[in-house]
Every structure is written in C-alpha cells, then in structure tokens.
Image (cartoon, rainbow, N blue to C red):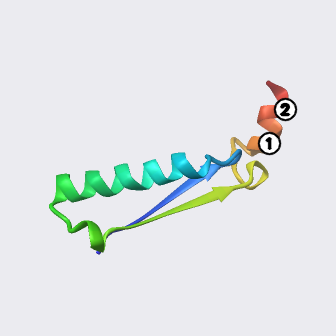
Amino acid sequence: MPIVNIKLAKPALDKETKAELIKDVTELLSTKYNKTKERIVVQIEDIESFDIGFGGETVEKLKAKQ
C-alpha cells in the first residue's frame, strides 16, 4: 500500500486544490505503478513557515527579506 506524505509550507492551499492534488497523485500512482486506487493513501500536511529553514534561516525570515 503506497503512502504519500506531502508537506506544504503555509499559506495553505484551499480545500478544493488539496482535493485535486490528492486525486492527481492517486491517479499517477495508480496508472504508472499499477496500484489500486483504494489502496493508495495521500496525506497533506501544512507546515508553518517558521518551522522550515534554508541555509540556517527560517522561511519566515527569508520571505520578510524579500
């Protein structure tokens, strides 16, 4: 059973866009790897920008600099 965990930096996608993403990823795995859609799990996790860092700085601070 494939389990896909997608982590996205906030601001979060809206419900409709998330549902589309889940459908698209499920379709891809089903088609490309011949997996049954009912056995594919897709989880989307929204992460705060201050919980992600690049080069020693949080995304929140990097965005503030722009």
Image position, residue 54 (x, y; %): 68, 43
Q: Is residue 63 left or right of residue 52?
A: right
What's under tag 1, amino acid-wise? Glu
For image coordinates 64% across by 57% down, the residue present is: 46
Q: Is residue 25 left or right of residue 66?
A: left
Which quadrant would residue 42 be assigned to in this image?
A: bottom left
What's under tag 2, amino acid-wise? Ala
Work out how far the residue at label 2 is from the one at label 1, CA to CA, in angstroms.
6 Å
Image position, residue 47 (x, y; %): 68, 56
Q: Residue furthest front?
A: 16
The residue nearer to you, when weighing 62 against 23, is 23
Quarter of the figure that contains the C terminus: top right
Are circles 2 and 1 on residues that touch, CB within 8 Å? yes
User: In this figure, which residue is indicated by the disc labeled 1?
Assistant: 60
For image coordinates 61% across by 46% down, the residue present is: 13
Image position, residue 58 (x, y; %): 77, 46
For image coordinates 74% across by 45% down, the residue present is: 56
Residue 60 versus residue 3 in the image, above or below: above
The tally of labels here is 2
Name the secondary structure under disc 1. helix
- Give the crowd class for mark 2: few <14, some 14-19, many >=20 residues within 10 Å: few
Q: Is residue 16 left or right of residue 66?
A: left
Quarter of the figure that contains the N terminus: bottom left
The residue nearer to you, when weighing 31 against 47, is 31
The residue nearer to you, when weighing 18 against 60, is 18
Q: Is residue 7 left or right of residue 52?
A: left
Q: Residue furthest left?
A: 34
User: In this figure, which residue is indicated by the disc labeled 2?
Assistant: 64
